[in-house]
Amino acid sequence: MQLDTRIFKSRGAQFNIANRFDKNQYGHFNIEGIDEWESEKKKTKFYEEHPKTIVNKVTSPDLPFSYSLNPYQGCEHGCVYCYARNAHEYWGFSAGQDFEQKIIIKKNAPKKLEELFSSKKWKCTPISLSGNTDCYQPVERKQKLTRKLLEICLKYQNPVGIITKNKLILRDLDILKKLNEKNLVQVYISVTGIDEKIRRKMEPRTATYRARFEVIKKLSEAGIPVGVMNAPIIPGLNDQAMYEVLRQGSILGATVAGYTTVRLNGAVGPIFKDWIQKAFPLKAEKVLSLISDMHNGKLNNSNFGDRMRGNGNIAHIIKQQFEKHTKQFGLNQEKFIYNTSEFIRHQPGQMRLF
């Protein structure tokens, strides 16, 4: 078998790792340049699904929200480190390039959310868009599922949190303003660094860092509570950018900040390892060693409390830096509290009365 050392610049994952649930596998074992294979790998395909439920209960003590909603499964952004890649295996796909080029569209997401809000079983609580894949990834421009979900949150006055790295969120500024009038929304913009050379390889189909900072600025100017999420921190690769990410975020209007360290769970471990050895061969050994140092000698630690922040000396240094910089730039001085007191329970299709 001949090893493939080429870099696919438009994708994060460089290969399709075997799905752990599949008994049989197929793949490309030679690199003579078969045109059909190459074109197939680069083409994005979309699949429609109609799930029975759309809101997920979050039980992890490491996450600051109780419910999440993901209108899409898989993500064209192609971030190589994304923990959500593993979930693609439950749909029969690979966590590798399939995750980036086989996108599942949950067409009935708005309908299911409205049914949930109309049910007497629902007790008003914030819902996070998205806890898994980016709700503003490129396909949202056409599908507009996220916009419809925000409209439903506004109709029922149910609070919603958003995290994204796509400037498409500015399209929905009108709805965000209305939600903010009742203290029903908070937005985090994910900024993993400041070096565009790293971003283009690590997050190939995302908005530039400059565009993301511009989003923070415009949201802040519109009065929307906005934060900067510096995650994941990858020691030896983007950890040195924390100071500048938090500094610029605060200058442009972010009032809160967060971070996580990278955890390469499941299939993400070999995907990331393969990628960094190809994308940054001179840094690969050091980066992998530093990641392992944070997770008890492994690329991943599944223990609650440690898995998102790591442990050991490297993790402790990152934590100290974050605390120092947030204090220096006036971030996280006050905790944002969603308004859950004005929820209105409608029946599906019912017009709101004024």
Image (spheres, rainbow, N blue to C red):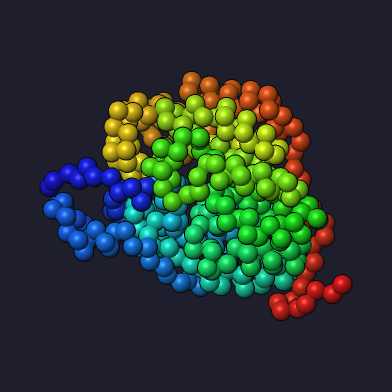
Q: Is residue 184 visible?
A: no
Residue 263 percent coordinates (x, y): 45, 38
The reply, left or right, for residue 179 in relation to residue 267 is right
* Quadrant of res 158: bottom right
Choose between 190 and 336: the one closer to the eye. 190
Is residue 15 positioned above or below 333 on the image? Answer: below
At 69% from the left edge and 67% from the top edge, which residue is drawn? Answer: 152
* Quadrant of res 235: top left
Quarter of the image with the C terminus is bottom right
At 12% from the left edge and 47% from the top edge, which residue is drawn? Answer: 1
Residue 317 percent coordinates (x, y): 53, 21
Choose between 342 and 243: the one closer to the eye. 243
Is residue 186 positioned above or below 149 on the image? Answer: above
Question: How many marks can you see?
Answer: 0
Residue 47 percent coordinates (x, y): 42, 70
Q: Furthest residue to the bottom?
A: 349
The reply, left or right, for residue 210 in relation to residue 326 is left
* Quadrant of res 214: top right
At 58% from the left edge and 67% from the top edge, which residue is drawn? Answer: 144
Q: Is residue 156 visible?
A: yes
Residue 227 percent coordinates (x, y): 66, 41
The reply, left or right, for residue 243 in relation to residue 42 is right
At 43% from the left edge and 63% from the top edge, which residue is drawn? Answer: 103
